[in-house]
Amino acid sequence: MTQSTSGLLATPRRRALVWSGAVAVASFSTWILFGARPGINLLLSLLAALLLARVVDPRVPGPARRESLLIDATVLLLAGALAVTAGGPAMALVGLSIPWLCALSVLQRAGHPFACQGLLRLLVAPFAALSIVLSQASGLLGDAARKFRGGRYESALRGAAWAVPTVLVFFLLLANADPTFEAWRSEVFEALRSLSFLPRLVFWLVLAVGMLGGLGLTAQLHPVALGQVRESLQRAHRTVTERSIALGAVALLFALFLVLQANVLFGDPGGRVGSGMTYAEAVHRGFVELTGVVTLTALLILVIDAAALRNEHEGRVRVLYCVLLAQCLLLLASAWVRLLAYEEAYGYSMLRVYVHLYILWVAAGLLLLAREVLTRIDRQRVLRSAVVAGLVGVMGVAYVNLPAWVVERNVARYQQGAALDRSYLVQGGGPDALPTIERLLPGMKVDEGVAVRCLILQRHARERDVLRTPEHWYEWNLRRHAARATLARLTASTQGCPARQGED
């Protein structure tokens, strides 16, 4: 072996496996991903790539390898969520999380573990990882070009240069004598004329280069250029007095705001006569500002503590940290109360559920930060905990059927005498909520149930509707499959719909 790897693959064999594996996985992924609906396909593609990465990885077990395995397992869990949920927002959250986690995996393999990532480097992780992957791929391509040019493969390359055009000419001639060859020739000419193959080819090239760079990095076949990922070192210079003035001023501002707005923050301004505010104004005019201020305050504490010049009066700053965090929790509680009042008046929606989850995530981050404040703030630990909490929330949004819960709550309000927003009931939850709507139809008044059923049929009447068009096996999705069965049952119902039943 050219490299001592304790019985693992030798470098030449790993190099051959990297090249062949990159081509194979890119081809397989292009087949099941390009132009396909999200489903089990992404899980299969990532599983193939990660299994191949494990085969070519020469590293012995250790903390870095365990962290890599944990990141990879999280990526697979998120990819599996795309085979469960059919909701657009949930899919979008998962779709944003997967590339970012893959970028962290690349940085970990390049010697920058997640445990050492700061806020800035977490934000720019996809760009740093892309730079590393492209550097790896270009290095491997350069090595291959040098081997072919003047190496033992030069004669094979010259032979291929003769063989390809010769076989092409013979193929075109034989196409006039065989119907199968003629059909293939017609398909090739049609593809060339319409250039329909170009998008698929570009998609394959992007995947192939990414796989080549990622596998080359994992197999340690080429030196890693890490100049793009720099440490941000700061000299301690913020004194206790400086930090106390800045934090104290913010704490006084928050205290004044909480006193002046006590009735508005924790009362029911939209429900009181003469308040001058509707429920919508009470929530929408305050929520963004309240949660934004809380998030910025947490970042302020992290930034101002990063360059702290500590002395025996450090306890004074710790008290101010605790006061600020307590005030932020009060602001989040007020936003939560406003949202509950709004839901009580107007019902539930997916957006309002996401708002609740965001408040919970920010509150969890504040509590994590409060724990750090009691000792000494470890920014990396806070960021890691916040990231883990966020990923757990994303997986929860995807795996838990929140649209079905929203439908159940809105129908429960309707059964207690509240108005039912038929249009949102049908459209708001997407395919995830269709089986639940079908289950709850018998509990509605006859005319209301018929109206909801007809709205569903009208919404999915288009020929190119996602629930009416067939799909390949690799596009299988649990809730989309259930919604398709539900739509078939509703369509087969003998109960007719009026000629016009609202707009969808």
Image (cartoon, rainbow, N blue to C red):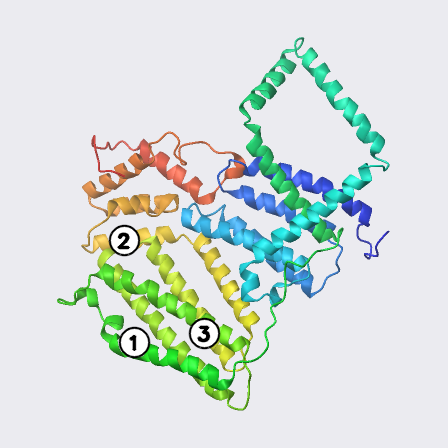
Asked if residue 458 lies left or right of residue 373, the reply is left
Residue 120 shown left or right of residue 350 in the figure:
right
Earlier-in-chain disc, 2 versus 3: 3
- The mark tally for this picture is 3
Residue identifier under label 3: 367
In this view, 349 is above or below 112: above
Task: Name which residue type carries label 1.
Answer: Phe
Contact flag, marks 2 and 1 (Cβ < 8 Å) = no
Mark 2 neighbour class, 10 Å CA radius: few under 14, some 14 to 19, many 20 or more: many
- Which residue corresponds to mark 2? 410
Looking at the image, is mark 2 or mark 1 nearer the viewer? 1
Residue displayed at 38% across by 74% down = 328
Which SS class for mark 2? Answer: helix
Which residue: 46% across, 48% down? 91
Disc 2/disc 1 C-alpha distance (Å): 35 Å
Look at the numbered disc 1 and give the secondary structure of its residue: helix
Looking at the rendered image, the disc whose residue lies closer to the viewer, 1 or 3, is 1
Label 1 sits on residue: 257
